[in-house]
């Protein structure tokens, strides 16, 4: 009996230790979960799956903007790859070796998920517009061999012509697949930036649908 009690106590201590130190709790101090914000599930999902992380000090910054390097890193993590040095140093003049995003940017460039400008710059700190974000997501879906044939009827969006010309087909696909929606019944607002909260929800929906 005494031995059994000791074993049970040991198990309780072990479980408590795992709960405290071994299993991360994906709740962030700057999200009021008691109010059930629309993005809470998405944030928890991408954090649990290692697609996105917090910004440090227990914060997620849901209203923060997504940069090109951030999204490259998110897609690199989602791909589950550990491929490195796919592009030689110096090909991208503004991506230095050893940065947190270096491998992800090289991977994205190598597989045509992202591109560089005419001067050889990847622009890792560029804040992505909605149409640019969608273009990278589309390219990733194509890289993974997912069905990217669907196209939405966008005739109801009065501002669709303001979608960057190279990205119009990708935007039609994203709307068709429910990855992105209009900012009103008649606008798609491609020029707006993508917030971290929006990216979390989009990536959750994308992963659930295609993975």
Image (cartoon, grey):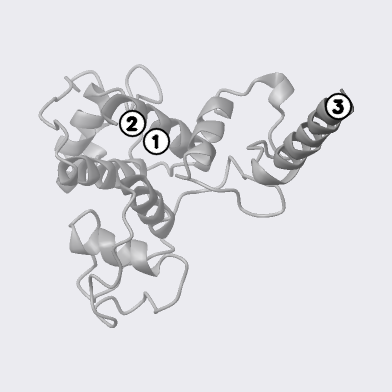
SS type, badge 1: helix
Judging by the rendered image, the residue that carries numbered circle 2 is 206
Mark 2 and mark 3 lie on one chain; the one further toward the N terminus is 3
Of the 4 image quadrants, the one containing the C terminus is top left
Judging by the rendered image, the residue that carries numbered circle 3 is 5
State the residue lying farthest toward the left: 149
Real-space Cα distance between discs 2 and 3?
48 Å
The residue depicted at 26 percent of the width and 29 percent of the height is 210
Real-space Cα distance between discs 1 and 3?
47 Å
Q: Quadrant of residue 84?
A: bottom left
55 lies above or below 150:
below
Which one is in front in this view, the residue at disc 2 or the one at disc 3?
Answer: 3
From the viewer's perspective, tell me whether residue 202 is left or right of residue 84: right
Q: Are marks 1 and 2 in contact (CB under 8 Å)?
A: yes
SS type, badge 2: helix
Judging by the rendered image, the residue that carries numbered circle 1 is 203
How far across and down, in percent of the image, does residue 198 sit? 47, 35
State the residue lying farthest toward the bottom: 90
The residue depicted at 61 percent of the width and 53 percent of the height is 55
Judge the density around disc 3: few (<14), some (14-19), many (≥20) Cα neighbours within 10 Å: few
């Amino acid at each position: 009996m005494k031995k059994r009690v000791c074993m049970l106590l040991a198990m309780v201590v072990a479980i408590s230790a795992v709960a405290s130190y071994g299993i991360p709790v994906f709740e962030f101090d700057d999200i009021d979960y008691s109010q059930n914000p629309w993005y809470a599930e998405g944030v928890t999902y991408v954090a649990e799956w290692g697609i996105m992380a917090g910004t440090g000090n227990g914060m997620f910054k849901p209203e923060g903007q997504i940069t090109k390097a951030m999204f490259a890193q998110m897609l690199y993590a989602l791909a589950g790859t550990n491929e490195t040095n796919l592009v030689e140093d110096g090909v991208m003049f503004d991506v230095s070796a050893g940065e947190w995003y270096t491998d992800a940017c090289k991977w994205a460039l190598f597989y045509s998920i992202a591109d560089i400008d005419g001067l050889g710059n990847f622009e890792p700190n560029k804040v992505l517009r909605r149409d640019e974000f969608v273009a990278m997501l589309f390219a990733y879906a194509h890289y993974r061999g997912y069905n990217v044939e669907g196209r939405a009827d966008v005739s109801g969006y009065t501002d669709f012509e303001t979608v960057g010309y190279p990205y119009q087909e990708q935007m039609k696909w994203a709307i068709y697949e429910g990855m992105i929606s209009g900012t009103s019944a008649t606008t798609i607002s491609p020029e707006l930036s993508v917030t971290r909260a929006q990216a979390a929800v989009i990536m959750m929906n994308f992963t659930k649908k295609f993975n």
